Every structure is written in C-alpha cells, then in structure tokens.
C-alpha cells in the first residue's frame, strides 16, 4: 500500500508525486531543508499534506539539532519555522501547523522535552488529519446518492492528506456505504494533479474514474452527465469564500448555471477565521515554466508572456455546503463559516 | 512569411502545425490520399483551412488521375469525395467544399475541362477565404475598443484559414485600425492549439499575447482582466447554436456570468442552415491518446478511462454576435442566422 508521507523516527519518507502515475518512488530525508524543498518543488502537495510534512520537517530539525541548550535550539527553530512558512503561501494548514509547533517551542524550556513534544505533535497532526478525513467522509457522504457521477478537480485525496482524502474521502465514504459512484476527474492544468494523481489513487481503490480535460466540464454538465461536484480547499475565509486549485471557480460558475450541487470538503485547519473574505487571500503565482513545459516538453513559443496563478477564489454563494470533520455548513453564502465553531 | 497551405500546380504544400511552435516545417504532397491524411492527423486544422485543403486535394486527385475518360474520372472522384468527407466530421466547411466540387464534377462532361475547373475552383475557394476573412475583420473590428484585452480559444487565425484568420482576423483588423489590443490565448487542451499556434502567429505579428491554461479564464474574467471574447466556429446551426473547439461553451457561460461580450467570427461557409439546432451537430470524438499523452509524454495512468469530445455547442443565447463576411448577426438567440441570407 502506498503512503503520502511517513515519519521514521529520525527521517521523513515522502512519495515523489511528480513521478506519478508512471513511477511510485519514495525519498527519505534526514535534514529539514530537504523536507522544506519537497514542499516548494511539489514533490508533495495538497494543503493538509503540506501541513503534515512541515510538522514532520520541524520535528526533524529539532531532533537533528546540535544546539547546546534550549535557547540555542529555539533560535534555530525560529529560522526553521520561517523557512517552512516560505514554502507555499496559499495553504493555510501550513501556517496552522507552524503556529501549533511555535506554541510548543514557546511553552517548553527543557531541550530534551521540547524535541520529544515536537515529534509527538507532528505525529498527532498526522493522525488527526486521517481521523478528520474519515469523519469528513461520514459527514459528507449523505450528499452523494447511489448512481451519482461526481466530478472533482485537482487532487483532494489520500495523496493530498495524511491518507483517505478530503473530497475523495467523501466519495470513498459513500462507496464504503455501498453506493455506486462514478468519478469524473478534471486533469487540472498546469500541474495535472487530476490526470496524474486522482486517477492513480482511484484506480488503486477500484473506484470507477474517467479523465477529462478541464475545459470539458461545462460540456458534460450541459449533457447531464455530472450530478455533483466535490473539491478540496486551500483556504476558506471567514465569509465562506474558498481558495482552491485554479479552475475551481470556473467549475463553480458552471455548476450554478446547471443547478449542480457544488461541495467543498476541508478540515477545520483549512478554515481561516482570520481571513475576512476571498479578497484577502494571497494567491500564489508559480513559475511560468509549469505552463510552457509539460514534463520537460516545450508547448509554447520561446518568450511568450504567460500567467500562472496557482489558485482562484470561489465565492461562498456558489458553494452548496462546506463539509468539515466537525459538521457541515450548508449554504455558506451570506453567513460564512463561524457557525461551525459553536457546534 | 509563413503560409498554411499552398497549391503548386501539381502538388500541395502544407505547414505541419503539429510541430509548431518549435519547428516551421512544410510537407509537399503529390497524391490526394496524403492530403486527406494531413486533415485526419491534424497536420493542418481549423474549419476554413480544412475546406481549402480538401478542395486542393480533390483538384490534385483529378489532375493526377490516369482515368481514360470522363466517366472513369467521375467514378474515381466520387470515391475521393467520400474519403475527404470521412476525414473530420464536425467542420461544415469541408462538406460545403465537397458540394461545390461535386457540382462541378456533375456539370462537366469533358475530362480536360473538368480537371481545369476543379483546379480553378480550389484556388477560388482559397482566395475567397482570405477575402472573406479580411471583410469579416472589417465587419467585426467595431466591437473591439482601444485598450481592450480580448480572450480567444483554440486557433481561429491565419493558421486555421487560407490566411488572416476569422477570430484573429477581427483582432488584426482592429489593430490595423490603430487600436491597442492585447490578447489572452487559452492553451486549448488537449491539442494545445492556443499554446502552440495562436501565440506563435500573434508573436509573428507583434500583437501582445499572454498564454493561460483553459481553467484560468473564469479567474481572469472575475478579476476584470478580460473585456471581450472572440472565437471561431466549426459549424453554426440555423438557430445560431455554434459548435466550436471543446471549452468554448464553458467560456461562454463564464462570459454571461461576468457580462463580457462573446463573439463568434465565421465565414458563411461555416453557417449551416441545413442543421436546425446544436443538438443536430455531430460532435467528433477523437483518440484518447490526445489526452493521455502530450507530445509523446504519458500524463495519465495506463488503462484509465478517458473522454475526448473535440467540440462543444454554445447556445445562440450565449452569443453577443456572429460576425461574417456578409454582415453581423447581433444577438442570434431566439432568431437564428437566416437574416444574413436576406441582407
């Protein structure tokens, strides 16, 4: 069985998702900088998986530190936190993880104990994520009916999380309940997470999946071949506006046009009450080479101007429900996400 | 200066568009079957260019025929027409060309004269296309304002026609009138005509162009960075419903959502009063390898199910105007295209 990320006690093993679906290869890192690079260069990706990887990277930095006392260690770790904060700007789980680790760093003055609690916290973040995904699946599966064809975008699956997945977790839970579900996976240019990752993990689980290019989604909605849409999220603002992989907003407008329910599945760690609206979310711009080259093959002329925003923002009003491990926020448009915190 | 297709008297030269933008290579064919294959395998593409290529291929077949009399030649040519009719099913220009050639075949009983008139007709179809594009540009340029950023999908440019282009012809005409126009080109998966061809020909003309992936169009419309959309067409039904490259329908829904004018530019030969509505248009399904492989590089797992409709249908109601060489049909929704024939 494959895994996204694994803690080995004194190293971290990461599935190199850039090589999927052709090659299942794991890299084992014994230093935190390589773990940070694996986030930056998208060897691992997906908001929850980024959070877990950062947690393990920080625990690894503490464990491997040659610091002579706890003050020295804390100074070192502050730099480590900064390095992880700079890897990817949009996924809020990353900052949520960093804050959890920072609290422990501030709250522990014994060096040996600090190293230990950071390791435990990283493992707890990992375990909690898988549990959250399973609970999210249970909370969201009621929206999927026997016989549904469910479209998803990007990869919000086991590969984007500790395991099981957010959007794909909801689909997995429905399948486990005995519902017959077919999935349509949008390939998700430029990085092709749908073509490479979502299809790969659903084939492994023998859940029927059909791959389409992103620009086909409207056509198949018009043809009545898509019943529901479930996607993940990288950050959900206080008002319910949701940043997710570029293309999500387009699908949400099409869903509205065709009266197709559009669900977000995301753990509480992706909800960000500190961000008022979608306008306040920083959208990461990635290298234009991701658009100009596909696996090293050049598809655009030399020197052409290219834009590559990695995310877009779907307004809360286009979302039928936000599914979390703590409960479901139905029709977040106009009311936002705060009700989940009083549940 | 490049060209899409050229008649050499006893052969046809075709720019191999599959190699663009990295390589500008022309192939010269002395037999009609190779010309037909160049349409099937998309060495040349674009509804008007397909029509011209077929006309030249049919003229070539006549010229090269060893038939001993005109009856023998006509029997041969009937098979040739069938072969060309089977190359691509959606582009109506192909059938329009074939009908024009068939009328000449039926109307000429002298073998030498028939060969001559078929050659003349092929050249006339080519010349008329370029003239139509220039007139279309003049008719449509009034919709583009100085300072506009205009989005287009696929390639409806010089490379899709005899020269100048339909959608890009409208943009070229506006630029020739001194308007400052920037173009956003959607890459157009799976075949990447936008990334490979539209950018290439606009760079050659020094018209500012920015490449985006198809799934970014909604994001940039929401951001207010797209003022107009102009695309070509493969077939316009009597009621105004328009088949064009897959993804066009999605863009049209997004345009409606954001109040952005959405124009179709197409010659009369693309308008098909014989087809009542979009539901009657045959949508070509192409090889799934176009999705699974990009320039030979595999991007999807072995054995995954894939759908690859090459076109979609945009309802007339989503179209602000259909621009032809004979005039403009504004707001075709509810009234269709027949008014253009009485103009």
Image (tube, coloured by chain):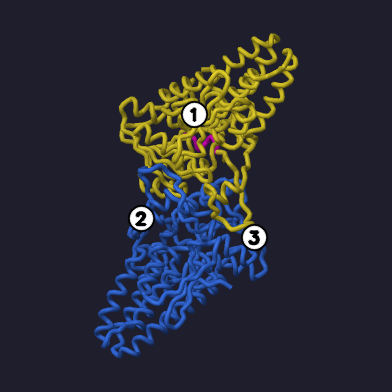
Chain colours: A blue, B yellow
Q: Closer to the observer: label 1 or label 2? A: 1
- The residue to which callout 1 is attached is B4
Q: Dividing the picture into quarters, in which one does residue A317 lie?
A: bottom left
Q: Secondary structure at mark 2?
A: loop
- The residue to which callout 2 is attached is A285
Q: Closer to the observer: label 3 or label 1? A: 1
Number of other residues with Cα within 10 Å of mark 2, as a class: few under 14, some 14 to 19, many 20 or more: few
Q: Secondary structure at mark 1?
A: loop
Q: Position of residue A315 (x, y in %)?
A: 42, 56
Q: Which residues are magenta?
A: B314-320
Q: Dividing the picture into quarters, in which one does residue B277 lie?
A: top right
Chain under numbered label 3: A
Q: Position of residue B246 (x, y in %)?
A: 54, 42
Chain under numbered label 1: B
Q: Nearer the viewer, residue A237 or A116?
A: A116
Chain under numbered label 2: A
* Residue B110 falls left or right of residue B147: right
- The residue to which callout 3 is attached is A208
For the residues labelled 3 and 2, say whether their Cβ atoms are less than 8 Å apart. Answer: no
For the residues labelled 1 and 2, say whether their Cβ atoms are less than 8 Å apart. Answer: no
Instruction: From this view, report whether residue A162 is shown above or below residue A120.
Output: above
- Cα separation between marks 3 and 1: 42 Å
Q: Is residue A278 magenta?
A: no
Instruction: From this view, report whether residue B94 is shown above or below residue B250.
Output: above
């Amino acid at each position: 069985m494959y895994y996204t990320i694994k803690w080995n006690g004194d190293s971290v093993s990461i599935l190199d998702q850039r090589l999927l679906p052709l090659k299942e290869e794991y890299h084992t890192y014994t230093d935190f900088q390589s773990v940070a690079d694996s986030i930056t260069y998208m060897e691992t990706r997906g908001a929850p998986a980024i959070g877990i990887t950062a947690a393990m990277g920080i625990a690894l930095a503490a464990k491997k530190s040659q610091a002579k006392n706890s003050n020295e260690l804390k100074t070192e770790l502050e730099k480590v936190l900064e390095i992880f904060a700079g890897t990817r700007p949009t996924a809020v789980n990353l900052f949520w993880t960093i804050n959890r680790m920072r609290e422990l760093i501030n709250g522990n003055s014994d060096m040996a104990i600090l190293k230990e609690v950071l390791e435990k916290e990283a493992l707890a973040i990992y375990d909690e994520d898988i549990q959250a995904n399973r609970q999210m699946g249970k909370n969201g599966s009621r929206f999927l009916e026997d016989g549904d064809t469910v479209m998803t975008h990007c990869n919000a699956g086991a590969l984007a999380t500790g395991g099981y997945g957010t959007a794909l977790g909801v689909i997995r839970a429905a399948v486990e309940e005995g519902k017959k579900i077919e999935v349509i996976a949008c390939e998700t240019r430029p990085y092709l997470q749908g073509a490479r990752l979502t299809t790969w993990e659903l084939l492994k689980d023998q859940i029927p999946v059909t791959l389409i290019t992103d620009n086909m989604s409207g056509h198949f909605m018009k043809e009545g071949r898509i019943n529901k849409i479930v996607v993940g999220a990288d950050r959900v603002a206080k008002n319910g506006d949701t940043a997710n992989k570029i293309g999500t907003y387009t699908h949400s407008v099409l869903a509205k046009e065709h009266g197709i329910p559009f669900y977000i599945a995301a753990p509480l760690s992706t909800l960000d009450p500190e961000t008022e609206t979608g306008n306040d979310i920083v959208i990461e711009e990635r290298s234009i080479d991701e658009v100009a080259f596909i696996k090293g093959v050049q598809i655009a002329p030399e020197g052409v101007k290219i834009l590559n925003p990695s995310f877009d923002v779907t307004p809360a009003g286009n979302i039928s429900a936000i599914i979390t491990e703590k409960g479901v926020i139905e029709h977040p448009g106009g009311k936002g996400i705060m009700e989940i915190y009083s549940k």
